Structure formats: structure tokens, C-alpha cells
Image (cartoon, rainbow, N blue to C red):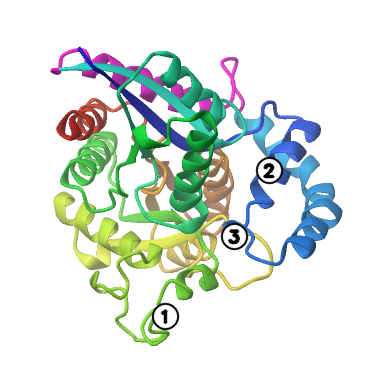
């Protein structure tokens, strides 16, 4: 029986919560032209002379707050997702070998592809586990996978599953997970906090230069013009989940987190939204981050710790982080279904 290789790709994490390890990770991450889209010479100077020396100690302290005995939550949770999906695929027709990799850090895409090739798979289905499309997440994972596959001589085996921002299985998994987690809670408002993105990253994908962030309702629906627009896809995701939960439009807010640098980023910023909601009388708040399918620094520290502090200090009484999907049974089944359907 032919064996199908499956590769789940996540963003990445430092090898350890130390300044040295964080510095290595930040250099690899920020030197990616898809992440920091400025000329290579200026990017090198900015990353190595300005950003990393200033941020590595600060960022290491943040990673230390969430580090576990098993390791980095992002790596641990991604590994567990890969294992859970592999276990699900045992019950499907066909034979599968599942690996996971990080775009930055370990395990590398190259090492994961090498393992799949050594297992003599007949094809490699690759799923970058980013629901919404962005060049700095999905596209760079695709480009790096193709490059490494070419070097290993297995490029013809590799194919990719598309971003799944509106896939019913993903939307249903999120809605079911949120409902279960908030069953014993009674939040007055739900914030969908997506990872942020520089505005220029969104605008440069608009070939017309007349639509994205120019037209007032540019993200109301997905069209050929904005089919790869991260912001539009984020709103589609939020509306779909809210619809499944039966939420009225005034009961939830879409925001964007993790701003870096002085460039203009997508708004509204999550920190600002949390403060504003408390100021308008919301005392019980829940936050879910649909752009992260496993918990990581951005959910466990930025939202659960700093976000909570912002909301409570602004007058809130109860703050609930809805965890990422991680290995929620319906989510695991959904991913396994996607893979089996492709075979």
C-alpha cells in the first residue's frame, strides 16, 4: 500500500527561553523577506543592530512566563496535534506518516521532509496551520517547503492544502470549542483577537490599488480582488463563528494583536479594544484568538496575562481566555478529514 506523508507546519519558537536562544530565533524570523519586507542590507542592519539586541532579553522574560517542563507550549501543542491527527488517520483508508515542522526553529522543515522521504511516502500533503492567508505566515511556509523539497529531490511529491479561514469544519470546531469553554461562564462580550499585520502587507496584495483599506466596506465579502486579504478573511472567520454561536453583531468585536515596530498595523488593536470595552461598562469579557490553532506566546502571555491586566485595570471584573483549539476532538477529526479527502 502506498504511504502518504503529512506535514503540519507552524510558525516556530525559540529552542529555550533564554536571551541567546530567543536572539537566534528572532534573527531567523525577522530576516525573512516575507516578514520584514525592506531591502536586505537595511533588514540585516535593523535586525542585528537594533531589534535583536534590544528585544532578546525582554522577549526571553515573556517566554519564561509560559515555558513548561515539556518545553515551549507552541512546540508541545503542535506535536500533540500531529500525534492526535496521526492516531485519527489510523482509522481511515490508506497509510499515513505524519510529521510536524516549524518555519523558524526546530524541528525544521528540511528535517521533517527528510523523515517523510526516508519513510518512502508516495506524496507529501502539507498543511501550514494558519487559517488566514498572509505572505508572512502561509506564503513563506510554502516557499520554504518547496525550496527544501527541491534540495532533497522530492519536490514533485509535495502539495499544499489551502488556508481554511471559512472551512465549515474549522468554523464548527471553533464554535463548539468556545461554547464548551464558556458553558459555565456568562461573558457580556466576546473579542476575536487575530494576529496583527502591517497595513502595507495587506495593500500590496490588492492589484487594483483601489479596494483594500480604501473602500469603506472593502472586507464585507471575499471577491477576486481581495481573495488573499488577511483582514477580509479574518472578518469572514469571525462572522462565521459568531453566526454558529448565535451572537448578535453588537456582542462581539474583531481586533488585532502583536503589533511590532512603528509601521501602521491593522486596527483596532486588541489592547485598545480591551480598555475601551471596560470603559463602556463591559465587566465580564471572553477572548478567543482564531488565527492561532494551538496555544503559544501570543495567547498564553500576550492575552491571558497582559490582556487580562489591561482589562482588569480598566475596570473589568472577569476575564476569560478561550484556549486555542489545540487537540479538541472535533478539530483533530476535521484535520484528519481534510487529509483523507485529498487521498
Using the numbered discs, state the Cα–Cα distance from disc 2 to disc 3 in whole angstroms.
Answer: 18 Å
Disc with the residue nearer the chain's start (2 vs 1): 2
In the picture provided, is 57 more to the left or to the right than 256?
right
Rendering quarter of residue 280: bottom left
Magenta highlight on residue 80? yes
- Quadrant containing the C terminus is top left
Q: Which residue matches tag 3?
A: 259
Magenta highlight on residue 295? no
The magenta-colored residue range is 67-93
Using the numbered discs, state the Cα–Cα distance from disc 3 to disc 1 in whole angstroms.
Answer: 18 Å
In the picture provided, is 169 more to the left or to the right than 152?
left
- Quadrant containing the N terminus is top left
User: Which SS type dominates the magenta stretch?
Assistant: helix
Residue 172: x %, y % from top left: 18, 42
Disc with the residue nearer the chain's start (3 vs 1): 1
Using the numbered discs, state the Cα–Cα distance from disc 2 to disc 1 in whole angstroms.
Answer: 30 Å
> Residue at 20% across / 56% down in the picture?
240
CB contact under 8 Å: marks 2 and 1: no
Residue 203: x %, y % from top left: 47, 75
Residue 285: x %, y % from top left: 38, 51
The secondary structure type at the circle numbered 3 is loop
The secondary structure type at the circle numbered 2 is helix
Determine whether 324 is above or below 44 in the image: above
Which of 221 and 343 lies nearest the eye of the viewer? 343
Q: Which residue matches tag 1?
A: 213
Q: Is residue 108 visible?
A: yes
Q: Which mark is residue 28?
A: 2
Disc with the residue nearer the chain's start (2 vs 3): 2
The secondary structure type at the circle numbered 1 is loop
Amino acid at each position: 500500500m502506498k504511504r502518504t506523508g503529512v506535514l503540519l507546519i507552524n510558525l516556530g519558537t525559540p529552542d529555550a527561553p533564554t536571551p541567546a536562544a530567543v536572539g537566534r530565533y528572532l534573527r531567523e524570523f525577522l530576516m525573512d523577506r516575507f516578514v520584514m519586507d525592506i531591502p536586505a542590507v537595511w533588514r540585516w542592519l535593523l535586525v542585528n543592530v537594533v531589534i535583536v539586541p534590544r528585544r532578546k532579553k525582554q522577549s526571553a522574560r515573556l517566554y519564561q512566563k509560559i515555558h513548561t517542563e515539556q518545553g515551549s507550549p507552541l512546540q508541545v501543542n503542535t506535536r500533540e496535534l500531529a500525534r492526535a491527527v496521526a492516531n485519527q488517520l489510523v482509522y481511515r483508508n490508506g497509510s499515513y506518516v505524519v510529521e510536524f515542522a516549524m518555519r523558524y526553529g526546530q524541528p525544521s522543515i528540511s528535517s521533517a521532509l527528510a523523515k517523510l522521504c526516508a519513510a518512502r511516502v508516495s506524496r507529501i500533503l502539507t498543511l501550514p496551520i494558519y487559517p488566514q492567508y498572509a505572505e508572512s505566515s502561509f506564503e513563506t511556509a510554502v516557499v520554504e517547503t518547496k525550496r527544501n523539497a527541491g534540495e532533497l529531490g522530492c519536490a514533485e511529491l509535495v502539495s499544499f492544502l489551502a488556508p481554511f479561514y471559512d472551512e465549515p469544519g474549522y468554523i464548527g470546531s471553533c464554535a463548539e470549542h468556545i461554547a464548551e469553554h464558556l458553558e459555565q461562564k456568562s461573558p457580556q462580550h466576546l473579542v476575536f483577537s487575530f494576529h496583527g499585520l502591517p497595513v502595507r502587507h495587506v495593500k500590496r496584495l490588492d492589484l487594483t490599488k483601489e479596494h483594500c483599506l480604501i473602500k469603506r466596506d472593502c472586507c464585507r465579502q471575499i471577491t477576486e480582488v481581495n481573495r488573499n486579504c488577511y483582514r477580509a478573511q479574518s472578518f469572514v472567520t469571525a462572522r462565521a463563528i459568531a453566526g454558529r454561536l448565535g451572537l448578535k453583531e453588537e456582542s462581539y468585536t474583531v481586533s488585532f494583536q502583536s503589533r511590532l515596530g512603528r509601521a501602521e498595523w491593522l486596527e483596532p488593536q486588541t489592547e485598545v479594544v480591551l480598555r475601551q470595552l471596560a470603559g463602556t461598562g463591559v465587566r465580564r469579557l471572553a477572548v478567543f484568538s482564531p488565527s492561532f490553532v494551538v496555544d503559544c506566546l501570543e495567547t498564553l502571555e500576550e492575552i491571558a496575562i497582559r490582556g487580562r491586566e489591561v482589562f482588569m485595570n480598566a475596570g473589568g471584573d472577569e476575564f476569560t481566555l478561550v484556549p486555542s483549539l489545540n487537540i479538541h476532538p472535533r478539530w483533530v477529526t476535521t484535520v484528519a478529514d481534510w487529509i483523507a479527502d485529498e487521498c
